[in-house]
Amino acid sequence: MEEPREESEPLLSRARGGSGRPAGSAGSRGVRVGPGAASRQDLCFDQAAVFIEDAIQYRSINHRMDARSMWLYRLYYSNTFQWTLSLTIFLILLLAFIETPSSLTSTADVRFRSAPWDPPCGLTESVEALCLLVFVADVSVKSYLVGWAQFRKNPWLLAYLAVLVVSLADWIVSLSLVCQEPLRIRRLFRPFFLMQNSSMMKKTLKCIRSSLPEMASVVLLLALHLCVFTMLGMLVFTGEKQDDGQDRERLTYFRNLPEALTSLLVLLTTANNPDVMTPAYSKNRAYAIFFIVFTLIGSLFLMNLLTAIIYNQFRGYLMKSFQTSLFRRRLGARAAYEVLSSMSTWGEAHPRGVGVDPQDFLQVLQRVQLHSHQKPVIMEKVRSYGGDLLSAEEFQKLFNEFDKRVIKEVFLVFDADVLPGDRDDFVLGILNCVFILYYVLELLLKAFALGLRRYLSYSSNVFDGLLTVVLLVLEISTLAVYRFPHPGWKPEMLGLLSLWDMARLVNMFIVFRFLRIIPSMKLMALVASTILDLIKNMRAFGGILVVVYYVFAILGINLFRGVVVAPGNGSLAPDNSSAPCGSFEQLEYWANNFDDFAAALITLWNVMVVNNWQVFLDAYRRFSGPWSKMYFVLWWLVSSVIWVNLFLALILENFLHKWDRRAHLQSLAGDPDTCCQVTVDLLFRDVLEEPTEEELLERLSCHPHLRLCR
């Protein structure tokens, strides 16, 4: 297929050491007055703007660059389209709570749960069809923008297309069977839409996949450890004659191989300690050695060894991720530089040399989608160069400004709410009036000093202002109803809370203003900033956890739906009064089931915490069969072993690097009088390897939709 003329033009065509005049260009920069030259200049500005946006967002630049494709590209990455796509993903995941089996009941307890509402056939299917159409449009736009050649090489896009085909086929089957099909395969694939929309989730998944061989070696050691001690336990604890009740209790944990293996597996998580040891220990204190040695080797050595291996494999994950992101930023910036510098050499050699004219760059910045606080800072930095052309190195350095978020906060006073020892409402009423007047005065002074628009630009000011307005309204209402405070003043209760109680409740939120002093304490600020960075960078890990929870919940519904039945309704479970102590029935765990999606999520959470998870293993073995243990053990491996250790590795990696480089924060921020929130990738920038000019130019020369002529 022939590419559009604008795209096939050699836009990056400045020869090294020569004029490299592009086809159709006029003589010099000063005579670009024709409509063709103006159109070409406008196209170059748009291309540079797109490359800069790609660099800021760490996106790949391997997409079509003609005028029509760039319009579609920027529309696709606009806030409106991306919010629409995110809302669509949220809706299709939310359907699991509504469609059969519905979670719209007040309780999950099988003894008290009412009949759930089942949506009519076609209701949720219609919403799902709209979501699938949005995804079809999404994959169509992506495939067009990257081109068919790139599409065939991208496994995620190919998987995206395959998942859509399977989902649409399964959707048609559902309608043809009037929504009575026993299994909906497409529900298992819904989390894929969340994963493919996040580049960080893809990188996290790749990291997990690369760590699996090393993790598998430790898991095999754990399995060997379990097998050896299981066989040893069977020899030690089943070789004696059952002569009393104490021996029979001891034998409940080792009466056969599966039960012995399960007991020791649970002991590995210390969930049944010391219950599993107490019967034998009561018979002979020497039996404690067996359980202590097993716990030392398994829980304290092998499990921590697994954590160390995961951290060792994972600790380079952030570095590799940031290295890739840095290369994408430098590549996008260099592509923008090449486009703009080619304009300064149209015609004969420019008298000021080779580089980017600051005026051209300022015009491009006007087209770039930036945060409101970033654009003025960058433009001021560009103006500081005057009329000198920007070199490639200076052009790249400007992009470091995009990593800084300036936070200039004005504090008129640090508040401290000292509560009097006497709880008389008269005193409290007077103090409340005084403090509310103070808050109102503070609000007015801040708004006057900063201006209304700048005042509202700070989230802390919005929070304070909202609380002040609410408190003022409640105080005026309180005075109108109860009059001014006086000795013996006791506001009467009107409904659940009096106006006075509501004012006191809202006033409690003022305590959150105390959090402002955290940046003043260096060590606390380091810990707090690490936590905030983790929250911001945990979206990928949180997304992976959502995917795992979603898939296991759907599998659990298909495997165990309806197996937990309340006593007296044909259940195999005994009555609570006759149930063994510590059993599923005696503990009244009836709400922990897989009868709907919400209940399945809570059940999986309770198993992930591994507190009393042996109760779930035993109950579902009795309700559905011994094969159910495979499901719960696999969930324990994925959630409690792999994901929790990866999360720990992320915390260690983030905190240790931040701790070691806390002295660089001020130098990275630049202005010592300005408090800057530095992103994690900028924090690690000093340990990353800058790509060479040859690497960047080589990658640009391989761009599928632009030609770099040297």
Image (cartoon, helix red, strand yellow):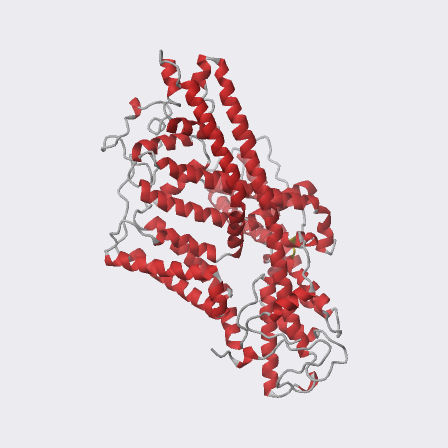
Q: Who's the residue at 47% across and 30% down the image?
A: 226
Count of labels in the image: 0
Q: Who's the residue at 27% across and 33% down the image?
A: 566
Q: Who's the residue at 56% across and 31% down the image?
A: 301
Residue 67's place in the image compared with 546, above or below, is below
Question: Residue 323 location, x and y as percent?
Answer: 63, 56
Furthest residue in direction bottom, as rendered: 34
Q: In which quarter of the image is residue 375?
A: bottom right
> Which of 141/157 is in front?
157
- Res. 265 in view: yes
Image quarter (top left, top right, bottom left or bottom right) of the C terminus: bottom right
- Res. 605 in view: no
Question: Residue 680 location, x and y as percent?
Answer: 63, 52
> Which of 480/445 is in front?
445
Q: Who's the residue at 47% across and 46% down the image?
A: 545
> Which of 517/375 is in front?
375
> Which of 442/78 is in front?
78
Q: Quadrant of residue 247?
A: top left
Residue 119's place in the image compared with 497, above or below, is below
